[in-house]
Image: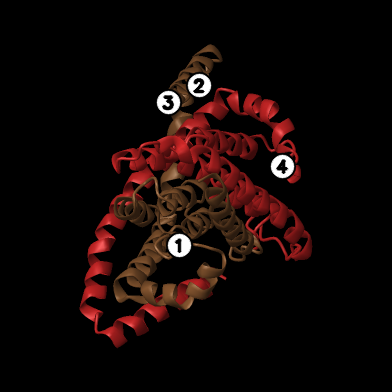
Chain colours: A brown, B red
Amino acid sequence: MAEYVIICFLGLVAFLGILGKKDIYQAFLKGAKEGLASGVKIFAPIVAIMTAMRMLQSSGALDFILKLISPFTNFIGMPSEVAPLALMRPLSGSASIAMLEDALERFGPDSLSGHIASVIMGSTETTFYIVSVYFGVTRVKNIRHTLVCALLADLTGIITGIIVCKLLS
Amino acid sequence: MLNYIWASMMLMSAVCALLTGRGELCLNSILSGTKDTVNTVLVLAGLMALWSGIMEAAKEAGLCGFIEKITYPLLKFLFPELKGKKEALSAIAMNITANVLGLGNSATPLGLEAMRRLDAENKGRKEASNSMCLFALLNSASLQIIPTTVISLRAAAGSKDPGWVILPIWITSLSSLLMAVISCKILQGAIPEKGEKRRE
């Protein structure tokens, strides 16, 4: 269904272009060139984030951080098996998908932990990745309050998710 | 800020790897992981070329003005500074639509296209504009109506009710989205743009 919206949009662009006798092919090439240049620009931020993420995982630092923050995760009522997913979610989409898969398999998709893990995965985004890549295409050096707000929003989502799952389960 | 977070992630990992003797494992995972990263970036760059091209063609065809006109009444609360900035607004509208429909592969390149247009409006200043901050925040919150990835993963894991999570995900997404917008609007007043000199 959603795919058809895009196809219709593409058709509409071509239709209007022909109708208005506009050179949309040249316009496309110009835009594509700029888009590609931005693509090159975000190469570095993506390598940076992915490297840090992989180091955290493979060095055992992630497990250490989890132990460190366990008083806090206990306090907000997060099951300990969901904590790694909640911590990884802002960093990497593919790593958190793998973690959700693993959690669903081990604890069962219809358990409370399974529910909480699914809800956290579905209601939050890869915050660090998005912020660094989005600002990576700009000339901005100072992102002001963006990261603070994004983390506040993630935290709100995680806490709400836990409460809602406990109430509805 | 990103700098300190990144640096502390690297430092902590390095110390952990040294203390637990996982140096080799750690290095291997970085080096082999870079291959996947290159793949991701190449695909993304290609998609960005595609969408930036389409947006430029849509502008040439006169569609941007139309999109801006129908979506501005909705977007004006969020982006009051962008009044009349057709290209930035229509890219934002397209990105939000793609996000809501769950078209992640198109949402990111469109979002980056919008960010590029916002940067052009920001005239090369080193400080992010209010619109840039809020727009990045909208994308770091989840706007998707049907969380297809999660539902299919649950189904694959043998759930009796894979769609159980839809309502909780809506409630949760809405709460974090509200938090993002409200905290952004409050903090943008508290941390105002310094109005540093504009580079031409």
The percent position of residue A129, horizontal first and vertical second, equals 46, 57
Tag 2 and tag 1 share a subunit: yes
The residue where tag 2 is placed is: A13
Q: Amino acid at mark 2?
A: Val
Q: Residues within 10 Å of mark 2 (few under 14, many from 20)?
A: many
Q: CA distance from mark 1 to mark 3?
A: 37 Å
Along the line of sight, which residue is nearer the eye, A108 or B54?
A: A108
Name the disc covering residue A79, or none. 1
The residue where tag 4 is placed is: B82
Q: CA distance from mark 2 to mark 3?
A: 16 Å
Say whether disc 2 or disc 1 marks the residue closer to the N-terminus: 2
Answer yes or no: is residue B122 visible: no
**Chain to which mark 2 belongs:** A
Q: CA distance from mark 1 to mark 4?
A: 43 Å
Residue at image x 42%, y 34%? A29
The percent position of residue A126, horizontal first and vertical second, equals 47, 54
The residue where tag 3 is placed is: A3
The mark closer to the camera, 2 or 1, is 1
**Chain to which mark 4 belongs:** B
Tag 1 and tag 3 share a subunit: yes
Residue at image x 49%, y 60%? A128
Residue at image x 24%, y 80%? B22
Q: Amino acid at mark 3?
A: Glu
Does dot 3 land on a helix, a strand or a loop? helix
Which quadrant of the rendered structure holds the N terminus of chain B?
Answer: bottom right
Tag 2 and tag 3 share a subunit: yes
Q: Amino acid at mark 4?
A: Leu
The percent position of residue B34, horizontal first and vertical second, equals 28, 62
